[in-house]
Image (spheres, helix red, strand yellow):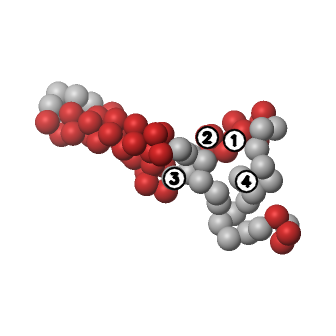
Amino acid sequence: MTNNLSAFDQTVRLISGAVIIGAVLAQPQLPAWLALLATYPVFTALINWDPFYALIKALKGDFDDTTMLPNGASKASV
């Protein structure tokens, strides 16, 4: 699995996810599902890979052959 997030994307995802989670914890009247949704950008930023980005690139045909390969697989082994 190759990285498909830039450093800027990672930073924006971490900060925005942390702010949303913090807001839900600080303001109990906010719905809890909002914090659950905020875990997705935080998780994808931490692993530096977004499956939706990979899917969009695959559908557009704008990807290298290694983008969709499982972790550790190389183009030669497929």
**Left or right: where does residue 46 sit relative to residue 32?**
right
On the image, numbered disc 1 is attached to which residue?
Answer: 55
Check residue 29 in the rendering and tell me which mark sits there, or answer none: none
Q: Secondary structure at mark 4?
A: loop
On the image, numbered disc 3 is attached to which residue?
Answer: 48
In this rendering, the label closer to the viewer, 1 or 3: 3
* Amino acid tagged 3: Asn
Residue appearing at x 22%, y 28% in the figure: 30
Residue appearing at x 29%, y 42% in the figure: 18
On the image, numbered disc 4 is attached to which residue?
Answer: 68
| Label 2, label 1: how far apart the Cα atoms are | 5 Å
Earlier along the polypeptide chain: callout 4 or callout 3? 3
Q: Secondary structure at mark 1?
A: helix
Return the x and y of residue 20 as percentages of the image width and height.
29, 35
**Left or right: where does residue 52 sit relative to residue 34?**
right
**Left or right: where does residue 67 sit relative to residue 26?**
right
In this rendering, the label closer to the viewer, 2 or 3: 3
